[in-house]
Amino acid sequence: MIFPDKVLVDRLEKNLALDMKAYVQCFNRLFPDYDAVCEEVGGGLAIYTGEQFINTTIGVGLGDAASITDLEKIETFFSIRGLSSHIEICSLTDESFINLLK
C-alpha cells in the first residue's frame, strides 16, 4: 500500500492542473460561447467551464501556503461568473488554509 506524503500529493495535483489547463483550452475550442477559464491561485488552479460543467479549485494550499488573499481571489473568480465557490481540499492541505475556510 502506498501512503502518500505532501510532496507526492502536490506532484499529483500539479499534473492534474496541467491536464485541466489543456481541458479548458480544448473546451474553449469546442464550446467558445462558454468562455471557459482557469486561473492560478494559492499554488493551485481555479477552473470555470460553464454553469453545468467543471467549476472547482484544485491543489490550493498544497505545495504553497494559501492566504486570505488567495481565498478572496477564489471567491471573486466564481462570484463574477454567478457561482458560489467550490474548493477541493485533502487531508494534506495546508492547515492554515483549512482554518480560513472555517
Image (cartoon, rainbow, N blue to C red):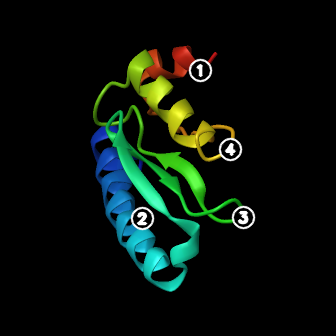
Secondary structure type for disc 3: loop
Q: Residues within 10 Å of mark 3 (few under 14, many from 20)?
A: few
Choose the circle earlier in sequence order: 3 or 2: 2
Q: Residue at x 58, y 40 (%)?
A: 80
Q: Which mark is residue 101?
A: 1
Q: Which residue is mark 4?
A: 83
User: Which quadrant holds the N terminus?
Assistant: bottom left
Relative placement, left or right, of 12 versus 31 is left
**10 Å neighbourhood of mark 2: few (<14), some, or many (≥20)?**
some
Q: Residue at x 57, y 49 (%)?
A: 56
- Contact between labelled residues 2 and 3, with CB atoms less than 8 Å apart: no
Q: Is residue 56 above or below residue 101?
A: below
Earlier residue among tags 4 and 3: 3
In the displayed structure, does residue 51 sit left or right of residue 76? Answer: right
- Give residue 102's quadrant in the image: top right
Q: Earlier in the sequence, mark 4 or mark 2?
A: 2
Q: Position of residue 8 (x, y in %)?
A: 31, 48
**Residue under pointer 2:** 20
Helix, strand or loop at mark 4: loop
Mark 3 lies on residue: 52
Which quadrant would residue 70 be assigned to in this image? top left
Distance of label 3 from label 1 (alpha carbons): 24 Å
Mark 1 residue type: Leu
Relative to residue 44, is residue 23 depicted above or below?
A: below
Residue 32 appears anywhere in the view: yes
